Amino acid sequence: MTVDFLIDWFAAMGDFPVIAFLLAVIISGIPIFLIMALNAIVAVYVERKVSAFMMDRIGPMGQGPGLHAGKWGLLQTAADAVKLLVKEDTVPETSDKFLFKMAPYIIFIGAFMGMAAVPFSSVLQVADFNVGVFYIIAVGSIGVIGIVMAGWASNNKWSLYGAMRSAAQIISYEIPAGLSIIVPIMMAGTMNLQLLIQSQSGTVWGILPNWIIFNNPFTFIAFFIFFISAVAETNRTPFDIPEAESELVAGWMTEYSGFRWALFFLSEYANMFVVSGLAVAGFLGGWQSPIPGMFDSAGWELFWFMGKLILLIFVMMWFRWTFPRLRVDQLMHVCWKVFIPIAMFNIFGVGIWKLIFG
Amino acid sequence: MTSAEIKAVLEHQFPAAMVENEDLTEKQVELKGNQWLEIATFIKNDPDLSFDQLECITGYDTGEDGPLQTRYNLHSMEHRHKIEVVISHNRENPNVASIEQLWRIGDWFERETYDMFGIVYEGHRDLRRILCPDDWEGWPLRKDYEGQETYHGIVVQKMKEEEGWE
Amino acid sequence: MGIVQGDQMILNIGPQHPSTHGVLRLEVRTDGEIVSEIKPHLGYLHRCFEKHSENVTYEQVIPFTDRCDYLASMNSNFGYVVAMEELMEIKVPERVDYIRIIMGELNRIASHLLALGVYGLDIGAFTPFLYMFRDRERILDMFELTCGARLLYNYMWVGGVSHDLPKDFEKICIGFLDYFEPQIKEYNNLLTYNKIFIERTADVGVIPADVAVSYGVTGPNLRGSGVKWDVRKDEPYSIYDRFEFDIPVGEGQFGTLGDCFDRYWVRMLEISQSVKILRQALKDIPDGNVHQALPKKIRPPKGSVYRRTESPRGDLGYYIVSDGTPVPYRVKMRSPAFTALSCLDEVSRGWMISDVIAILGSLDIVLGEIDR
């Protein structure tokens, strides 16, 4: 169900192009928002439980409704969300109030726009662009503007540190991420996410599904570079230096509270969702079944896509609760001196591989 | 070396600096304050003494009429011997040379003793109060210390003499 | 701090900050991320320990020592009672000595576990912290069993201990040690040999041995710099000379000698040594009385004593002056964390803000003891 489909559908009903366009966009925007909210609620709960089990705890628990947090703490995130919404919304006296209030929305818009191009299945995709890969990479970097705005407008030294670290980090890690995502584009010869996924049907090496990650050694390396860079782009541990709790208190989010802070939270989990979605579409065969030729009806497509995506998000959480944090210069070292050369070499290698075997 | 041998070395090198004090134990030696920096440099650098660790500086008030004292516990990592040096200061104008550049920990120990007893360490590069607030009045560990009536508008509660702590 | 010029900026770390381990304010002059000067401001937790001591009786000082180093209260008690017994020239029953050493070493393990776990937290690893807390909890349970308190024990008294060991304590303690020893390996796998952890700590914040001695840095911090000095071995008190244990020193295996990793690693090794001492003590502990016959009100003879003992943070010294009355004339505590913190400025210059947090964590300071 794409926006184009809705526009065509409205156009068939009458000749009001502007209204039809707006209606289509709003109708398709609502599910994105719902997915984002649902994603955050579920992911926060899962993160609490995953971290708890990794730390030998039990995490949020409750005995039924009422003041407790539901059975197994299932209502914990709902309670958190309510708490955040009714919290006092403070704006520091000395802050740049306009920018301070704008920043959460900009970050949110960046994450929201990315969600629009995630291909849930061969039919479930809000906007099917011919440059889908490029689009996700592009809107993904809108967030950094919001982060710098938030850090600057807070008029707080910790926030400023966090914002500057974040800007440096996100911009740097976009390069290896971008260079690695070129590999699937080269393999499939398209930037359209649906065509990219369709090109990954069948098998390779006899038994493995024909996903780009399994295609050749260079694509295999490219996937890991892309995934690690994606973790860095979403500011997750071990790359969470912009909000480094033990150093910068809360980094660029220090002065935020209540709903605005909730938007940051929502955006962080939406970003994880989007970059994992791109990794799944680009390298892991998108909605293709891992057993080629079986379980590939429309329902299974959604299942496989979400399954792979949740696996990647779980790996991100696993990282977070296992690794310590890198230092700023070490982070930059990894990016510029390790990932970028390897990623460039990968492009070269894939080109040669395609020339010889493709 | 034992304390007696260390004392003998000091007496040999600085005969004018020694002070007889019967209240002290055999591990302690009282010196005059005027030569202290010179003595300290000697006992730190002399290869036989080589007191490279300043364990502790204790401020001490001998009583409302007596002098104030600074007590230095010195220890040698190399020879594993130790000595306690006592220096008395007169109550009105307590001052002595600072040894913070010889033993770097002397910096904070002297600040602490200054904070509590008001003993001025001359030559200390940053002699400020360390534990009490900068605007605290008086020297709390002196025996004649009278607490402030109010501090920034807060009335300071006094311990009642007759009730005491028993 | 003087005039701030050019790109420099003054940053206040604390008094409320996640990584200052208490209420400490660091006034940091930075150029971007690079730190050029640190001025620690102490005293936010000053509770007038020394002034209080001059107004209460000798026994009543012991609860105050608990509150100084609240992470190793047993060792704080231990230092005070050892100094008092030296001043009064009394000998305690043998069983008391053993009980004190068992408690002191258990508390050393607990304190080191907290130090290591929190250090992981400072570096950004959350999980080891909770693993170590899980095991520390068992030690606190044993303390609760013994004296009813979990944090501030007031357990060691002059001439004895407040309660005898509970029934089956030996069995419970050995059970704990059997459970605990394999856990050390788990900590190492989880945190110590993590590449990122090593990157963050090795070569960072090097304290050369001569600087460490000059700053009066003691305990695991000094041993991390390669100086083999341990009061338990070199100036034995209580009955530490009866036990066989090693003094681990830093080796600089991943970087320079005296870096943050060495200080961390020495603590990790010391835990095993404490386990070793505990096993010996639990094997040999004799039966007997746990109180020395003393008058209700202690009146030590006139005189003074300076005695240092090995607390988990280093040389914990007590300077006690008695004038023959039941009230101390002067009690001074030489706090190991105080001296360790004093070298922070020199060690941190030229490092980044993240490293300052790493260095501060590696020094394992307790503000209650610094401010007293």
Image (cartoon, rainbow, N blue to C red):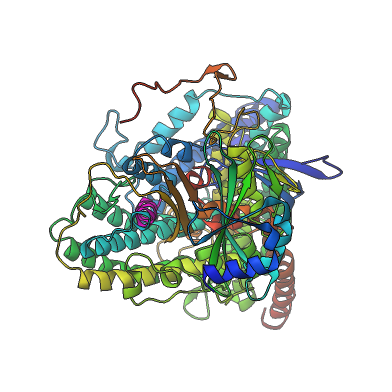
Taking depth in this image into account, of A275 and B95 the one nearest to the observer is: B95
**Farthest right residue in view:** C6
Q: Is residue A11 above or below residue A204?
A: above
Residue A69, position as x, y percentages in the image? 32, 35
Magenta residue span: C71-84
In terms of image quadrants, where is residue A239?
A: bottom right
Question: At 70% across and 49% down in the image, what residue appears?
Answer: A165
Taking depth in this image into account, of A15 and A134 the one nearest to the observer is: A134
In terms of image quadrants, where is residue C331?
A: top left
Can residue B137 be seen here?
A: yes
Residue C50, position as x, y percentages in the image? 47, 40
Residue B117, position as x, y percentages in the image? 59, 38
Residue A336, position as x, y percentages in the image? 74, 65
Side (left or right) of A300 relative to A7 = left
Q: Is residue C81 magenta?
A: yes
Q: Is residue B48 magenta?
A: no
In terms of image quadrants, where is residue A225?
A: bottom right
Q: Quadrant of the N terminus of chain C?
A: top right
The chief SS type of the magenta part is helix
Can residue A128 be seen here?
A: no
Taking depth in this image into account, of B11 and A337 the one nearest to the observer is: B11
Taking depth in this image into account, of C115 and C7 the one nearest to the observer is: C115
Side (left or right) of B161 relative to A103 = left
